[in-house]
């Protein structure tokens, strides 16, 4: 599966005057990047509408992804979360309206975009994909607190959802706008140590092979994009890759597509 911030994938007229739609060259580059990665499932961030995404899949991805999940989120410029899948989608759950207690006790907040759950039927098994997009870093300490609050709420949702399904493969993916070692990602992955401990699919790789977003005009970057999976499912994990070397990747988005492979053998009979 993959996780990909596709950057401003919106239609003309969207974007609230803050963002501009992709050019034809950028759309072609985006399609080429997705084709080269050839993931069975991709969690997407910064998508403008379900109609736009379905048209893109049909016209530029040759209809390869027959199943699309999209729910409008809370972003005021219209950037929402979505999933495209080669396998049937059985359930989509949004948490855009959830009230999230602030860690400092000062009332409630909500997910900046959403925390989207998508259940997918793969080889007669249910796989659950969580998709998120953390609040952007704007040089303010309050943005970090917001990401931590959202991560705490997201972990609570995951633990509650997956408690009845201890053997189910699930992943938490998305552009979290923090590195693995930052507090928000650690909160989401580890919490207080109770419940499933989530592993970073890029763990153990060289730092240069972990970077999914490069600082504009500089050689340094960050691993803001993640695919986290439960430690007890490690035997199914087959490897991961940041798709940074494709011919058109830098034109397609300011993020690189991240993919992780998992083995899902068919059930007997």
Image (cartoon, rainbow, N blue to C red):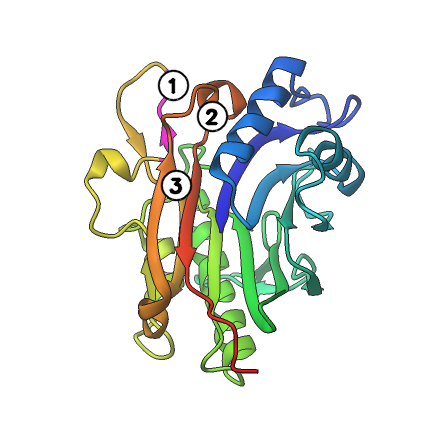
Mark 3 vs mark 1, CA separation in Å: 14 Å
Residue positioned 51% across, 72% down in the render: 266
Q: Earlier in the sequence, mark 3 or mark 1?
A: 1
The residue segment tinted magenta is 212-216
Q: Position of residue 268 (x, y in %)?
A: 52, 82
User: Along the horizontal axis of the image, is 204 left or right of 177?
Assistant: left
- Taking the image as shown, residue 133 lies to the left or right of residue 21, namely left
Residue 184 position, x and y percent, is 38, 54
- 164 shown above or below 180: below
Q: Given contact means CB atoms under 8 Å apart, are the residues at marks 2 and 3 in contact?
A: no
* Mark 2 or mark 1, earlier in chain: 1
The overriding secondary structure of the stretch rendered in magenta is loop
Question: Do the numbered discs 2 and 1 sit on residues whose CB atoms are within 8 Å?
Answer: yes
Q: Nearer the viewer, mark 2 or mark 1?
A: 2
State which quadrant residue 177 falls in.
top left
Q: Is residue 141 left or right of residue 116?
A: left
* Circle 2 SS class: loop
Q: Earlier in the sequence, mark 2 or mark 3?
A: 3
Measured Cα–Cα span from mark 2 to mark 3: 11 Å
What residue appears at the point 38 percent right and 79 percent down from the top-left corner? Answer: 195
How far from the left and from the top, in percent, is residue 134? 50, 46
Spatial CA distance of label 2 from label 1 is 9 Å
Q: Nearer the viewer, residue 106 or 142?
A: 142
């Amino acid at each position: 599966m993959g996780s990909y911030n596709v950057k401003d994938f919106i239609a003309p007229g969207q974007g609230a005057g803050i963002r501009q739609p992709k050019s034809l060259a950028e759309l072609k580059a985006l399609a080429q990047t997705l084709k080269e990665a050839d993931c069975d499932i991709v969690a997407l961030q910064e998508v403008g509408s379900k109609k736009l995404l379905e048209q893109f899949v049909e016209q530029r991805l040759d209809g390869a992804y027959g199943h699309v999940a999209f729910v409008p989120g809370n972003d005021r410029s219209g950037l929402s979360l979505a999933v495209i899948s080669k396998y049937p989608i059985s359930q989509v759950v949004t948490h855009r309206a959830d009230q999230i207690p602030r860690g400092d006790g000062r009332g409630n907040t909500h997910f900046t975009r959403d925390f989207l759950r998508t259940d997918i039927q793969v080889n007669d098994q249910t796989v659950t994909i969580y998709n998120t997009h953390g609040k952007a870093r704007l040089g303010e300490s309050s943005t970090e607190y917001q990401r931590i609050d959202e991560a705490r709420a997201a972990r609570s949702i995951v633990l509650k959802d997956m408690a009845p399904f201890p053997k189910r493969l699930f992943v938490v993916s998305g552009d979290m706008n923090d590195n693995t070692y930052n507090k928000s990602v650690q909160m989401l992955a580890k919490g207080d140590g109770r419940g499933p401990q989530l592993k970073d699919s890029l763990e153990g790789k060289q730092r240069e092979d972990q970077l999914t977003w490069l600082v504009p005009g500089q050689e340094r970057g960050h691993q803001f994009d993640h695919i986290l999976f439960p430690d007890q499912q490690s035997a199914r994990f087959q490897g991961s890759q940041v798709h940074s070397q494709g011919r058109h990747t830098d034109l397609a988005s300011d993020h690189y597509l991240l993919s992780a492979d998992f083995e899902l053998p068919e059930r007997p009979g």
